[in-house]
Image (cartoon, rainbow, N blue to C red):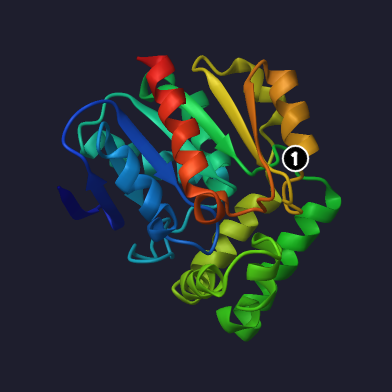
């Protein structure tokens, strides 16, 4: 069973009819289709909730959060409205950051957190990069990123079908939605708080990820006392490049929290 629903302007899709809730959160300039293969796998045994961020995919544009905590608040409201009392929170890139913010702000909602392909602390170069991209799309539109971002997100061995899917997701993002998310990324600061998570944390990194280097993920896991999984040959969009392996990692993480 797959049910699509708009919840306070946020597009959601629920797959599966029983078991632990698993929430899959996307990165910037992507949509819930990023998780298609993983949702199909996990929904055999769990209830899987996917969603689009404001200004992305099928979600509405307003209001646009101003920081990662604001995105976490919007996601918490979706879970509350759907009557989801606790879930395993999994996210890639920005989705990982928001999942952690949500678990810190609302520990009652988080049975576990899987953090994929993300850094935890913005430095000056990272902040400048995202502020520049925000200004770029406001001036030139999302088409200006349609070649640059897939090259950043996917390994050289990724097929043309994955690159085309990445491009479709980018073009399905509105400039204002991208700019808001980019501004939130520019102010990323969760690293020193991850040790305060009450829920078990699992960190996943891609060996070829230039946006969130694997060694940073390994260090983060060690510092936070988390489990660590490395995806060989995989870049930033692990749900596309390594769906089978990531689904297996998520399944094990959810089963550990039961």
Disc 1 designates what residue? 214
Left or right for 7, reference 126: left
Mark 1 crowd level (few <14, some 14–19, many ≥20, 10 Å Cα): many
Q: Position of residue 93 (x, y in %)?
A: 59, 47
Write the residue at 37% across / 24% down: 109
Mark 1: secondary structure = helix
Instruction: Inspect this view and state whether residue 61 appears.
Output: yes
Above or below 30: residue 26: above
Instruction: Inspect this view and state whether residue 69 appears.
Output: no
Relative depth, front residue between 218 and 112: 218
Write the residue at 35% across / 34% down: 22
Q: Quadrant of residue 229?
A: top right
Write the residue at 21% across / 40% down: 16
Left or right for 180, reference 71: right
Above or below 228: residue 171: below
Write the residue at 34% across / 62% down: 59
Q: Quadrant of residue 133?
A: bottom right
Quadrant where the C terminus is found in the figure:
top left
Above or below 188: residue 227: above
Q: Position of residue 92 (x, y in %)?
A: 55, 46
Above or below 47: residue 224: above
Give the number of marks.
1
Q: Position of residue 104 (x, y in %)?
A: 52, 24
Relative depth, front residue between 203 and 63: 203
Q: Position of residue 88 (x, y in %)?
A: 40, 28
Left or right for 32, reference 105: left
């Amino acid at each position: 069973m797959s049910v699509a629903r708009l919840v306070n302007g946020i597009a959601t899709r629920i797959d599966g009819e029983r078991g632990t809730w698993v929430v899959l959160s996307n990165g910037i300039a992507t949509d819930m289709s990023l998780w298609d293969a993983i949702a199909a796998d996990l929904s055999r045994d769990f209830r899987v909730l996917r969603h689009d961020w404001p200004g992305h995919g099928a979600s509405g544009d307003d209001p646009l959060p101003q920081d990662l905590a604001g995105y976490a608040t919007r996601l918490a409201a979706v879970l509350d409205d759907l009557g989801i009392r606790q879930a395993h929170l999994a996210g890639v890139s920005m989705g990982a950051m928001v999942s952690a913010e949500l678990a810190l702000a609302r520990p009652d909602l988080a049975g576990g957190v899987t953090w994929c392909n993300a850094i935890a602390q913005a430095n000056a170069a990272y902040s400048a990069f995202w502020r520049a991209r925000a200004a770029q799309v406001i001036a030139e539109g999302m088409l200006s990123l349609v070649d640059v971002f897939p090259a950043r997100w996917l390994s050289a061995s990724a097929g043309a079908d994955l690159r085309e899917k990445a491009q479709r997701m980018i073009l399905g993002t509105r400039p204002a939605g991208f700019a808001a998310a980019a501004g939130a990324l520019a102010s990323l600061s969760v690293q020193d708080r991850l040790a305060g998570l009450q829920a078990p944390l699992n960190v996943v990194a891609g060996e070829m990820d230039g946006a969130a280097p694997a060694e940073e993920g390994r260090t983060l896991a060690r510092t936070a006392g988390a489990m660590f999984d490395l995806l060989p040959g995989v870049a930033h969009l692990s749900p596309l490049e390594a769906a089978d392996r990531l689904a297996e990692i998520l399944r094990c993480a959810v089963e550990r929290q039961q």
